[in-house]
Image (tube, helix red, strand yellow):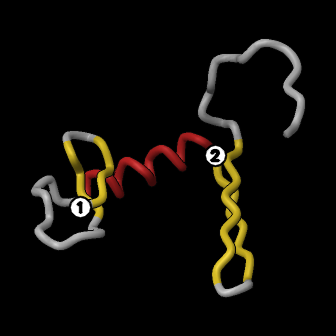
Amino acid sequence: MEQLYGLPQPLTGNEIVTIQQEQNGQFAKCSMPLSEFVTFILAGLTALSTAEPSEKGVLWNNAGVVSIS
């Protein structure tokens, strides 16, 4: 684990978020500003159904919380 030094600072939205994903032995890495990442996540959340799915393993918007049926 990396060492953190200093106190947390207020977020400005310009901080860079990096996501690294491995799939089938291949790695993909994506970096973007925090503000863009939050917009992306919120868009995905609002696109989810607010009705609980009848099938198991489906993502849905459970009053603002991403849940898996």
Mark before the other along the chain sequence, 1 or 2: 2
On residue 69, the disc is: 1
Residue type for callout 1:
Ser
Crowding near the residue tagged with mark 1, few <14, some 14–19, many ≥20 C-alpha atoms within 10 Å:
few
| Residue drawn at the location 87% of the way across and 37% of the way down | 2
Please give the count of numbered marks on the rendered protein.
Answer: 2
Mark 1–mark 2 contact, CB under 8 Å?
Answer: no
Q: Is residue 50 left or right of residue 68?
A: left
Q: From this viewpoint, which residue is outermost toward the top?
A: 7
Q: Is residue 69 left or right of residue 4?
A: left
| Residue drawn at the location 77% of the way across and 12% of the way down | 7
Q: Nearer the viewer, mark 1 or mark 2?
A: 1
What quarter of the picture does the C terminus occupy?
bottom left
| Residue drawn at the location 32% of the way across and 50% of the way down | 66
Q: Is residue 13 left or right of residue 3?
A: left
Where residue 61 sits in the image (x, y, percent)? 23, 51
| Residue drawn at the location 68% of the way across and 63% of the way down | 30
34 up-or-down from 48: above or below: above
Where residue 26 sits in the image (x, y, percent)? 73, 83
Local secondary structure at mark 1: loop
What quarter of the picture does the N terminus occupy?
top right
Q: Nearer the viewer, residue 2 or 8?
A: 2
Residue 60, quarter of picture:
bottom left
Where residue 24 sits in the image (x, y, percent)? 66, 87
Residue 55, quarter of picture:
bottom left
1 up-or-down from 11: above or below: below
Local secondary structure at mark 2: strand
Crowding near the residue tagged with mark 2, few <14, some 14–19, many ≥20 C-alpha atoms within 10 Å:
some
Disc 2: which residue: 33
Residue type for callout 2:
Pro
On residue 8, the disc is: none
Find the distance from the CA under tag 1 to the CA under tag 2: 31 Å
